[in-house]
Image (cartoon, helix red, strand yellow):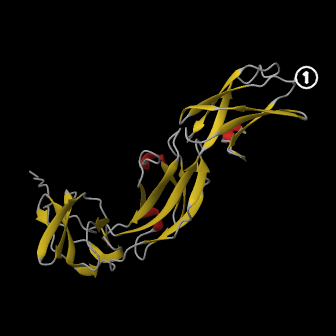
Amino acid sequence: STSISGATTRTTRPVAPTQLTVSSVTVASVTVAWVASLDTGGDPLVRQTLSYSVSGTVATVQLDATAVSYTISGLAGSTSVDDISVAAENSAGSSSVAETVSASTSPSEAPTISSLADTATLAGEATSPQAFTVADFATEPSALTVRASSSNANLVPPSSVAIGGIGTLRFVVVTPVAGTTGSAVVTLSVTNEAGLAAAASFQVTVEEAWQSIYPTSGYATGGTQVTVSGAGFDSASDYTCRFAAGAMVATSGAAVLSGASLVCVTPGWLFVAQGVGFSLLKGAAALKAGAQGE
């Protein structure tokens, strides 16, 4: 008789990953990469373990069996990360460590932000976009965060400060609260990955302006009460409504109802007026008109 015996394959521990290198460092992180185990010992890998030491404290991280890189993050600047190693593991156990590497994070330095000019706008209008730049020694510009604060949240709450742009070049637009005037100091703070920050401030002045009138018709015969809406009207000041129809010009004193509205009455014309224009005077000077009142 003939007997046939079957051979069995014994699973062994895998060979350690190789070619471990430091691929990049930042002020807050160290990234390493390696070549996966070339011999898994006859059984699929179940995981890999990365180990490292910071100031004598050893840390381990369990990684997927297919991982070939890892970033050690949350570090401070100029931090030494020692004895970085990677081991592979299958059902038979863990491999040895073939090699170790060490690295240090970049030195900590605060980012920079360019200065911004003071700006002014009329009540009810946003400021023109103002450009500024941010930079950092170790952090990519796209990873820098910029936040806004305000010295007068009733006029310019931080949520009304829009910050745009990417990378180094950014811009800011401020939209004051409708119906308010005054000034506020807006501070932009830029923060890098290490938590270090720099700031630049600029003043926003919101000037008194009228924005709309109601009604917008019925001026030709006179006697129509006109309500003027705006911001910053002062009951201690003298306002005059000025109506012009061709060569004819007439004025009417205005009564302040609140900081946001005043009223006046259209004058009677010597002749029937057509195409009447409107402007508002404060004392002898024409008050600026917001975008809606132009």
Residue 16 in the image: state x and y as whole percent. Answer: 21, 72
Q: Is residue 244 above or below residue 117?
A: above
Q: Secondary structure at mark 1?
A: loop
Residue 146 in the image: state x and y as whole percent. Answer: 43, 60
> Does the image show residue 290?
yes
Q: Residue at x 72, y 46 (%)?
A: 284
Nearest the eye: 104 or 193: 193
Write down the residue under mark 1. Answer: 271
Query: Callout 1 environment at 10 Å: few (<14), some (14 to 19), or many (20+)?
Result: few
Nearest the eye: 138 or 251: 251
Residue 186 in the image: state x and y as whole percent. Answer: 46, 57
Q: Is residue 279 left or right of residue 28?
A: right
Nearest the eye: 44 or 130: 130
> Does the image show residue 42?
no
Q: Is residue 24 left or right of residue 213?
A: left
What amino acid does circle 1 point to?
Phe
Residue 117 in the image: state x and y as whole percent. Answer: 56, 65
